[in-house]
Amino acid sequence: NRNIPFDTSPRAVRLYYLYNHWTMQGATYFFIFVDLALALFEEPAVYLLPFLVTSLTEVLCLLVFFGRLFHFAQVTPRDVFWKDTKNICIMITILMTLIDLIVFGALRISSLRGVRWSRPLRPIFLINFAESRQIRRAFRSIRNTLPEITYVFLLFMFSVLMNLKTVEGLPYFSNYLEIVFDMYVLVTTANSPDVMMPAYDFSWWYFFLAVVYNNYRKHLKNEIRKLAYMKRRKMIEAFNLLKVKEEAEFVVKEDRWKRLVKLVAPDISTSHRELLLRICDEEQKGFVDKKSFVRLADLLNIQVITMKLHSHPLEVWIPHVYNSAPSLLLRKMVQHKVFVWMYDVIILINAVFIALDEENPFISYAEWVFLSLYIVEILLKLYTYEPRTFFARNQFWNWFDTSIILAALIATVLNATLKSVTVYNSQQVLDIVFILRVLRLIRIIDSIQRFRVIMTTLINIVPTMLTFGGLALVVYYVFSIIGMEIFHGKVQFFGGNSTVQHALYCGNPALKDTTFARAKYCKNNFNDIASSFVVLMELTVVNQWDELLEGQLIDNMETSENDLGGEEGAATKKKPKGLMFKVASKRYRTVDALLQRMFEAEIPPEEEGPSLEQILNLSPDDTYLKNPTFNSAV
């Protein structure tokens, strides 16, 4: 929450650190999740709980939200707090939810039916707390995009309604109900080309989806540009507070810089802090200038892995044997690429044997051979590479290989032992053994470069996907609650083997002889929150959605310089002593980070950039005048 305009008094700063502590943020997200999950236990429920239990739980969540908001009010200046619409929305939502609970509870006591109209408002807490700035940014970009694409959409619809006809010569939209249905099909992408193609065949100008993308991208870039400029201004403000004059320029002294970094990033090691100082003060003058100080935030955001280089235990215990000619030859063979390729071939052969009939004794014996080869591989690697380096926290594939092999060894030995002592045929243990065998095939991902690129790309886009996942959750939740209130009980599911006559038309005579009932879609209903989510998911993705995914993004997101491969190749070089630092990633993990770096490049290092008022009033059509060629670059 770097953009919180907090008070600078000592008490407010302490409260600011407490507000941003991971435990406080985790507790907030936990109670937001509990509040949203109440829909599982309220009528219509997946697992029904008494109203008193759910209402008291919701009141507890509201108290936590109010406490969090009160804490935030102690951090920010009073005038800023009351001008922030997010805070007003949270307070109004808390008040409306309490009123709804009281009214609904009174109606239940009076045996009258009520509607919990405040439940669709619950996602407001997920959106408006300060921690959810990424979701708010996505919402703003979508909200700002809608007005601009509305005109194009209306023009497109006007042309379709007035001029076009279908292939059969009939009007494109003949009546209101057909318009509603065809537009529903088009919006949900179900058979979208079938609805769109008559207009597209007439003129390619009607294909307006590019307008949606371009406008969304424009507003997203504007959001990120504001953040980049705000970061520059705040770093300049921090420099002005800490600076002292050294000869002809203002600088930050080394001791003050160290205290600042220790306060801002208390979790990094002393050696990491010294590394950052060497970068900021390359000539070791004893101070950090303005240009180097401004980039400190970027340096702290770079994930650096500190690796302590150790000697192999065998080299310490039996150096003559470990450093002998046969030992060096063996270690060189293990470090060679041919060793990796050989085991890749073994994995592929193992995959063929896994697909064959296990009842064949030859196949069963072959499994022991493959398992033995994998164990030998692990032992050879542990002999070649220092164990603590081999099992470092960042060596995911080494941990994965060893865990799978050990688990498969234990399960296979247990299975063989039980078979030999008793008449034993437990399908569960056999399934576990088979799953472990199949999991061993995943190891080949670490060996093939293109596979590693794909895996790394998938991992790196997770934060962005979580943002849009939260956005989808909000939309789904609101419409699920509304759908349950309106359509609950209208469609019934009786099970696949039900003999009840009502099952033929989903318990609703209006659905008799309809395609919906004949296709057995009865479970697609709004009878509880889980079923509602499934229905909305089906309406979102349905068929032919994959035809829209034409772009090949993998190569643009990652390259061979950024992967999850191990450090085994480094062992072929002469080992340095002491500490070694490794940058975890040399590439931009997200498009946001790339755009931020490009916008920061607009501002010359010696300048502060636009004023605060100019930053807040930036529009997507504005550019920073210091760099007239920026638009062509972006």
Image (cartoon, rainbow, N blue to C red):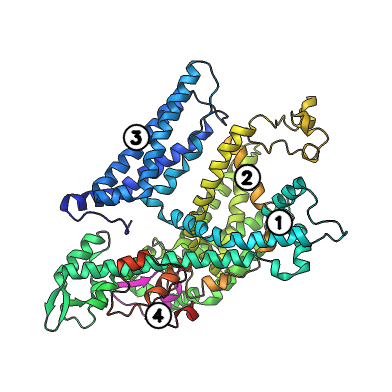
- How crowded pointer 4 is (Cα within 10 Å; few <14, some 14-19, many 20+) is rated as few
Q: How much space separates mark 3 and mark 1, taking CA atoms?
A: 57 Å
Give the vertical position of 248 relative to 542 (above or below).
below
Q: For numbered disc 1, what is the local secondary structure?
A: loop
Query: In front of the other: label 3 or label 4?
Result: 3
* Residue 625 drawn at (x, y percent): 38, 79
Q: Residues within 10 Å of mark 3 (few under 14, many from 20)?
A: few
Front of the two marks 3 and 1: 3
Labelled disc at residue 573: 4
Residue flagged by tag 2: what amino acid is it? Leu
> Mark 4 or mark 3, which is nearer the start of the sequence?
3
**SS at mark 3?**
helix
Q: Residue at x 51, y 46 (%)?
A: 474
Viewed as shown, does residue 8 lie left or right of 589? left
Q: Residues within 10 Å of mark 1 (few under 14, many from 20)?
A: few
Residue labelled with disc 3: 63
Left or right, residue 239 beside residue 414: left
Q: Are marks 4 and 1 in contact (CB under 8 Å)?
A: no
